[in-house]
Image (spheres, grey):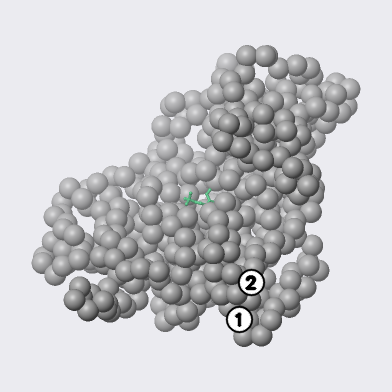
Amino acid sequence: MQLALASLEAAEKVFRREHHQYADTAVLDELRSTDYARLDAGGHVYLDYTGGGLYARSQLREHFELLQAGVFGNPHSINPTSAASTALVERARASVLEFFRAASDEYLAIFTPNATGALRLVGEAYPFRAGDRFLLTFDNHNSVNGIREFARARGAETTYIPSAAPDLRVDPELLPRYLTETIGDHHNLLAYPAQSNFSGAQHPLTWIEQAHAHGWDVMLDAAAFVPTNRLDLSVCHPDFVPISFYKMFGWPTGVGCLLARRQALAKLERPWFSGGTIVAAFVQRQYYQSAPGAAHFEDGTVNYLSLPAVEIGLRFLDRIGIDTIHDRVSALGDWLLQALGSLRHSNRSPAATIYGPQAYEQRGATVAFNFLHPDGRIVDERYVDRVAGEHGISLRTGCFCNPGAGEVAFTISRETLVGGEFGDATVLEDYVRMIGLPSGGAIRVSLGLVSNFADVHRFMAFADEFIDLVEVPDDLPPRIVC
Ligand SMILES: Cc1ncc(COP(=O)(O)O)c(C=O)c1O
């Protein structure tokens, strides 16, 4: 054990010497040993930051001290306790705009339960009509894919822009072609992720201006991008930006945001009204007056006791510096990508296959892959899950709610999907077999705020267990969800 520790320390020293970008982020090692001591105390290697970020102890302390010291009422009133809550909600709102450098005369920050809630707000209120277009990349989270149902119900056409294996990027020649395929005076919406939650690929922010130049509105799904990258809304100007705060700093869950350009919001048509979204409504006359600004989009009572934690979390990130976090995960991510890509069996065949950008350029530190047996078959992801658990490693397996990226990664054709229907009685197991998937999905590891050298080192020691692995045990549990 002591020998292993000594070799880990020596390896880290060399890594620091060779990667100044990493050495300059030592402040995060201090945080790891204080604010995040629970990780090492519990022997955890947390590698699912794209699933959810981790909170610092100091965030909780500051939040709970605030709640313990104050008396906070429902903000929909003007009494003193209500005014105290309103002040905190508005401070949180201002801190979101400030963090993303969004001018308050250009953007509004609308609080939602999560990124999905933000996406739904746009989907259900975007004025889709016959002849309008909803254009989106294959590489999208299901919460973006689902908007096609709103488009379909209103007669608008949905078109997907394909990505290409192995990098799972979009051919740069393609986008202009799709953007010019519009007819007359219509509402057209382009949606894509700034960073893929599947492969870590970062799609160009320059698409925003390209799309605007052709009269399109742009929804930039930044949920997987903003935890480790700067999104500067004074430089790029997407119309709608959904995010979830727990992905950025772990606490609180249940709060997200739609950053929206005022100009684009003005064209949304909300399908209903509710408490909180109106100034007045009548019963004897079926008339209501919408509330101005963000309130028009915030149904019911906002999560006013959690919202102060958003301001605290953003301040916490600002103190560290999002660029410091970016530098750290880039240095570790680059190493992880290279180490995994060069893993070999004794017969020199690759022991892992990576889905997505193979080089650490225009990508984030989210890596999707599968282990391979020496004969090239994919190692069953359920076995990988089992071994990871034994190593105290938290990673993800499956398709990560991004079926388009998975379809390209596993070269599943449209014909195959049309042929294989997922009926009520079908179990996932049979479906995987029916459409010829080599496994139940991919493995995903993602780095974040307090990832360190030891995490990647321990992950690679775990990966070594798959070298020369010929068979997996036959007692793996059934697959339940993708
Ligand atoms: C890119 C992306 N978009 C949207 C979402 C949905 O976020 P939530 O489940 O917090 O609504 C996720 C979640 O993983 C994501 O990674």
Residue 98 image-quadrant placement: bottom left
Q: Is disc 1 placed on a helix, strand or loop?
A: loop
Near mark 1 (Cα within 10 A), the count class, few <14, some 14-19 or many ≥20, is some
What residue is at 22 percent from the left and 52 percent from the top? 66
What residue is at 80 percent from the left and 35 percent from the top? 342
> Which amino acid type is marked by label 2?
Arg
Taking depth in this image into account, of 3 and 179 the one nearest to the observer is 179
Residue 127 vertical placement versus 6 (above, below): below
Q: Is mark 2 within 8 Å of ligand 1?
A: no
> Which amino acid type is marked by label 1?
His
Q: Which residue is mark 2?
A: 133
Residue 100 seen anywhere in this rendered image of the structure = no
What residue is at 76 percent from the left and 49 percent from the top? 414
Residue 168 position within the rendered picture, expressed as x and y whole percent measured from the top left: 74, 52
Residue 32 position within the rendered picture, expressed as x and y whole percent measured from the top left: 46, 39
Q: Which residue is mark 1?
A: 186
Q: Hey, which residue is sitting farthest left in the picture?
A: 79
Residues at circles 1 and 2 in contact by the CB criterion of under 8 Å:
yes
Near mark 2 (Cα within 10 A), the count class, few <14, some 14-19 or many ≥20, is many
Q: Hey, which residue is sitting farthest right in the picture?
A: 347
Q: Quadrant of the N terminus?
A: top right
Q: Quadrant of the C terminus?
A: top right
Q: Is disc 2 placed on a helix, strand or loop?
A: strand
Q: Is residue 402 left or right of residue 269?
A: right
Residue 60 seen anywhere in this rendered image of the structure = yes
Residue 453 position within the rendered picture, expressed as x and y whole percent measured from the top left: 60, 36
Taking depth in this image into account, of 177 and 333 the one nearest to the observer is 177
Q: Earlier in the sequence, mark 1 or mark 2?
A: 2
